[in-house]
Image (cartoon, grey):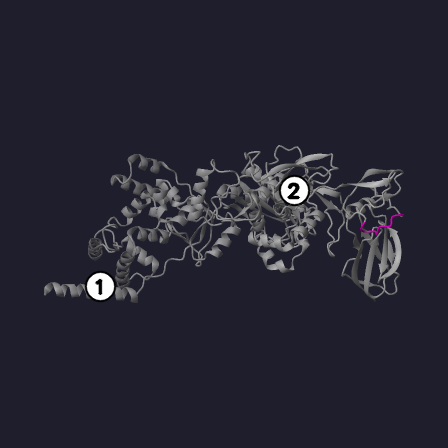
Amino acid sequence: MFRSVKAQCLAVSFIACFALDRLFPLPPAPRYSPIVLAADGSVLHAFLNPTQKWRMKTELAEITPALQQAIINKEDRYFHYHFGVNPLAIMQAAGRNIFQTGRTTGASTITMQVARLLEPKERTFGNKLLEMLRAMQLEAHYSKAEILQLYLNLVPYGGNIEGVKSAALLYFQQPPDYLSLAQTVTLAIIPNQPRVLVLGKNNDRILAERNRWLRQFQQQHLFPDQDIEDAINEPLDVQRHAAPTLAPHLARRLVTQFPSQPIIHSTLRRNPQAKAEDLTRNYVRRLHELGISQAAVLVVNNRTRAVEAYVGSADFQDAASSGQVDGVRAVRSPGSTLKPFLYALAVDRGIVTPKLKLPDVPTNFSGFRPENFDKSCAGEVTVERALTYSLNIPAVRVLADVGVPVFTDKLRLAGFKSVAKAAPRLGLSTILGGCGATLEELTGLYAALADGGQYAPLALVLNEELRLRNEEWKAKRKESPPNSSFLIPHSSLVSPAAAFLITDILAQRTRPDLPMGYQNSRHLPKIAWKTGTSYGRRDAWSIGYNQDYTIGVWVGNFSGQGSPALTGADVASPLLFDLFNALAYNSPNRWTTPPATLDFRLVCAETGLVPGEHCPNQLIDYYLPGMSTARRCEHQKEALVSADGTISYCRACVPAAGFKRQLFPNPLPEVLAFREAQGLPSSRLPPHNPACRLVRGTDDGAGAALAITSPLDHAEYVLDRHDKQQMLLSCAAGSEVRQVFWYVNDRFLRAASATERVFFRPPSGAVKISCADDHGRNVDIQLQVAEL
């Protein structure tokens, strides 16, 4: 019976305690100062909490045994043995206070102090009872380690500094677990008198109090005697320092992204971050006189995709130059920086190989007429030269072959948000910077090229998965091939073969975008890199990579104002080279190897195609078996001509004797037209035998297609009624064409040589332009003409 009543009483008590706990919940957790840590755990950046206090959260691992022992022996010797309230201490304190014997004390345990710090109240007898109840409630909810952690996060250190971690960083510039015994005891004695013992102001008084407690701890045998003596002899020359402010742009980004986390573990490394900030700041100072005020830098570990340095602007505090804008995330025109990725896609689709020659002549792409940066054309260039010289016309031609939707879809997979959003409206100008991209997106794309074409999102936060990734990589680095992505969930943007070929081209040193003064410099890093300059010289880019790192650099003005000096080669690359020399100076020279899917073959030196029967000059080129184009070269065409070379014969009209076989150049019509317009040596087939009765156009089935290059098909032209404006007629024809015939609205206009420029006044309204050549080929276009 008695046991039953006792059990019932216990049950009622338990229910009552549970109900009271629900009715009077614990105060909310303290509002901490957000801090962003580097990968090694050091504090990169700290912010004031919402109440404008420095209250940085101390993690359990940072509470050293020395700190625990000093605090517990000083504040609450029986902390591990009571349930929030120490009855013996209360009785002793009551006796002292009533009989006024000894020092008046409050008998507060560490748990009771936590309760008071969580809910500050006036010191009265009633509030003391509430404090005891809260202390017991805390003991029911938290472990002793967690209660001690709360105490160390809330204790005052004078002014707006609270918590041992805040005091350790702001006074000693070290986290709590890096403090010496003397520094630890110093922080243990201040909370009782934070207004009297002010570090930096009352150092002599604090030193005396510290040594007094060290002697007391020595008597208690709390620490080894030698450690005590060393601590007593340690000077106390301390003052308050500013909070850490490295990586301000990333810190703000992460705090906004994770608003409820007091501690954010970033992937940044302190030394690379500090070096990148210093180099960027000092470099931009030298550019101010050129009208250039800002730069942004991103450093990525190729294996883990961890961002190890993040510089959003040259100077975060420079309000005049909008220093708080994050240049890493700003959407800008990428200039020519997307060209390597385009050529890699073209390699995978068998469209190009490094030695293949592309036309580099003025070309009209359905109304879009791109120009090279220097306004000149070379006629024909190899793919590798087109890329290293960043030529615009060949790049647009390749994009037309690959297809804009294919290109933008791949960029969407690589995380290009602006491109994905604008994809339906993008055209061939995309490859020349006619789209939006960020430094973060571009650097991630180049990191994929550095890793065999495998894309993975960049990591900014150091989570457990990334820690394991780092450990695995360090363990397996020697076993793995250079372009292995086994550590990172990835998507394949281009093949390892295409990535290797593009890397091999971008690693060449003989190129026009090498900054002045670096031609014979020992400080030229061993990297593959590409530069870019946006229209109007508003953005200068230089992005490079080696086996370990990919570094992206943007230089310009956040206002969008251009500068004549603003080019990727002259302004962005020097900073890129400085960063590589500072962060990866000892990188290996040869860090890429051809994958097994690549092979060699002989190609014609004139075209880069598989040699035909008239290709005496040949060279070796890479190709992808079963993928790369197997088209045979026809850069020379054999023709049957009269003995004096004045007429040519088709196979139907060739005489029995008195003829000879002769090779004639057979370039693309637009290349031939360009050469003749430039006055370069060129030769055409003699006119066809006039006595031949075979219908022209069916003589041998050979010859290039005829194309009208001016005016534009389906274009609208507006002419001044009072001005004698005329329209240009021109065409591109094969080398066998000598004469063409122009028609307007199916009415004969005039005959002209194949390269002649014809001018005429078109009628108003819908106009049909036709051109026929002397081999029976013809082409039509439609346009609209209006007069004002």
Q: CA distance from mark 1 to mark 2?
A: 80 Å
Question: How many neighbours does mark 2 have within 10 angstroms: few (below 14), some (14-19), or many (20 or more)?
Answer: many
| Residue 439 covered by magenta stretch | no
Q: Is residue 199 visible?
A: no
Q: Assign a secondary structure to mark 1.
A: helix
Q: Which residue is mark 2?
A: 353
Q: Nearer the viewer, residue 36 or 787?
A: 787
Residue 786 vertical placement versus 285 (above, below): below
- x and y percentages locating residue 62 in the rendered image: 37, 46
Residue 14: image tag: 1
Q: Which secondary structure class fits the magenta region best?
A: loop
- Residue range in magenta is 691-698
Q: Assign a secondary structure to mark 2.
A: loop
Ranked by sequence position, the earlier of labels 1 and 2 is 1
Query: In the image, 660: left or right of 407?
Result: right
Count the marks: how many? 2
Amino acid type of disc 1? Phe
Does the residue at mark 1 contact the one at mark 2 (Cβ under 8 Å)?
A: no
Residue 523: image tag: none
- x and y percentages locating residue 384 in the rendered image: 67, 41
Query: In the image, 359: left or right of 743?
Result: left
Q: Quadrant of the C terminus?
A: bottom right
Image quadrant in which you'd find residue 114: bottom left
Question: How many neighbours does mark 1 have within 10 angstroms: few (below 14), some (14-19), or many (20 or more)?
Answer: few
Q: Is residue 674 visible?
A: yes
